[in-house]
Image (tube, rainbow, N blue to C red):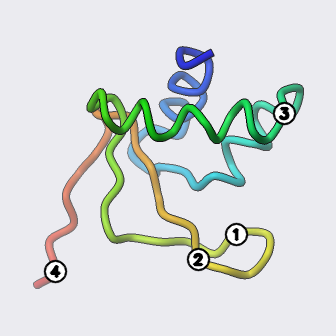
């Protein structure tokens, strides 16, 4: 299951994605099945999350996630 969630996140390339994007991409899976994988993928270093957020469907900010090969650090100059 982790593999499916990881590959779904990686399909967004350098744009990254928020939780709502991943849930839309894996709409055949339950919410709790998908979201439970985020923590373990972060701990394994397979996905990167920094301070950046995007507005989700609810209107609240959600953290942006990237596959480790697609993450580019934002330079706040």
Circle 3 SS class: loop
Quadrant the N terminus occupies:
top right
Between 70 and 63, the residue placed more toward the observer is 63
Q: Which of label 4 and label 3 is nearer to you?
A: 3
Dot 2 or dot 3: first in sequence order is: 3
Q: Image height check: is 52 above or below 66?
A: below
* Residue 71 position within the rendered picture, expressed as x and y whole percent measured from the top left: 28, 45
Residue displayed at 54% across by 22% down: 7
Q: Which mark is residue 35?
A: none
Dot 4 or dot 3: first in sequence order is: 3
Dot 3 or dot 1: first in sequence order is: 3
Between 32 and 58, the residue placed more toward the observer is 32
Q: Which residue is mark 3?
A: 30
Between 37 and 52, the residue placed more toward the observer is 37
Residue displayed at 67% across by 41% down: 22
Q: Which residue is mark 4?
A: 76
Rounded to the nearest angstrom, the CA distance separating label 3 from label 1 is 18 Å
Q: Which residue is mark 1?
A: 56
Dot 1 or dot 4: first in sequence order is: 1
Answer whether labels 4 and 3 touch (C-beta < 8 Å): no
Q: Is residue 16 left or right of 60 when viewed as pictured? A: left
Q: Which residue is mark 2?
A: 61
Q: Image height check: is 59 above or below 38?
A: below
Dot 4 or dot 2: first in sequence order is: 2
Rounded to the nearest angstrom, the CA distance separating label 2 from label 3 is 21 Å
Circle 4 SS class: loop
Circle 1 SS class: loop
Rounded to the nearest angstrom, the CA distance separating label 4 from label 2 is 19 Å
Rounded to the nearest angstrom, the CA distance separating label 2 from label 1 is 6 Å
């Amino acid at each position: 299951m982790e593999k499916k969630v990881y590959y779904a996140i990686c399909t967004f390339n350098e744009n990254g994605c928020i939780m709502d994007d991943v849930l839309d991409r894996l709409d055949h899976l339950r919410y709790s099945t998908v979201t439970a994988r985020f923590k373990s993928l972060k701990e394994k270093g397979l996905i990167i999350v920094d301070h950046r957020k995007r507005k989700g469907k609810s209107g609240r900010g959600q953290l942006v996630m990237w596959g480790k090969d697609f993450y580019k650090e934002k330079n706040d100059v």
